[in-house]
Image (tube, rainbow, N blue to C red):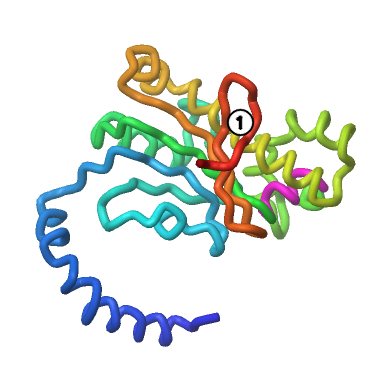
Amino acid sequence: MKTFSEMIQGYRRFRDGDWHRQHDRWEQLKEGQSPQVMVIACSDSRVDPTQIFAVDPGEIFVVRNVAALVPPFETTPGRHGVSAALEFAIQFLKVREVVVMGHGMCGGCQAALTQDLHGNELGAGGFVAHWIDMLDDVREPIAAEHGTHGRSAERAMEQAAVKVSLANLRTFPCVQEKEANGSLKLHGAYFAISDGILHLLDHDSGKFHPAE
């Protein structure tokens, strides 16, 4: 794994290579950005949306956090980072599609399933514990059917988390309005680290299927 000093060497290669090859693109981006798609993904270092979707600079607006979760709409005091990014993307950038992308081997979903951090709200892992408690309601049926350990249970939780985020997205007034008038579409996706296959959520069946 690279250190920051080694990453600076990568930056120099970028400046000498891609920066010059895509110079016209960067010149356009100086005037602003106009991505059509927002991607909400996990902070996990193995699931970079720009790499998975092979996009150029300026093509997607990305928000990453633990387990790719979207909290429900609320106006209580606090720092609502995901909500602010969502509002900016939809209301100001006017993206036309929002993709929630979960992934395999997700540590946040695993912690939500095992509840290993449960009760740690005031100690180490407290921020994570409070964040992933958004999955508490979907945990119970998954644990009852699959248990709390093993890939079948973890995969069920990882895919359920995508559905939770999509449901929470639909609590935002701006999402409700734009989805109703057809100017915004929501998508669920799941990237399997083990085989590199992207799965898409079929909203009618509630199942994930490999992208064609």
In the picture provided, is 123 more to the left or to the right than 53? right
Residue at 41% from the left image edge and 86% from the top image edge: 5
Q: Quadrant of residue 89?
A: top left
**Magenta range:** 106-114
Q: Residue 142: give x, y in percent of width and height.
A: 81, 34
Residue 111 forms part of the magenta stretch: yes
Residue position for label 1: 163
What is the x, y in percent for residue 159? 66, 39
Q: Name the residue at 58% across, 51% down.
A: 197
- Residue 34 in picture, x, y percent from top left: 21, 42
Vertical placement of residue 98 versus 20, above or below: above
Examine the structure image and report whether residue 204 is included in the region drawn in magenta. Answer: no
| Residue depicted at x 70% and y 47% | 109
Q: Residue 187 at what x, y percent from top left?
A: 48, 32
Residue type (three-letter) at the residue carrying disc 1: Lys
Instruction: Describe residue 135's horizontal placement relative to residue 93 as left or right.
Output: right
Relative to 26, residue 33 above or below: above
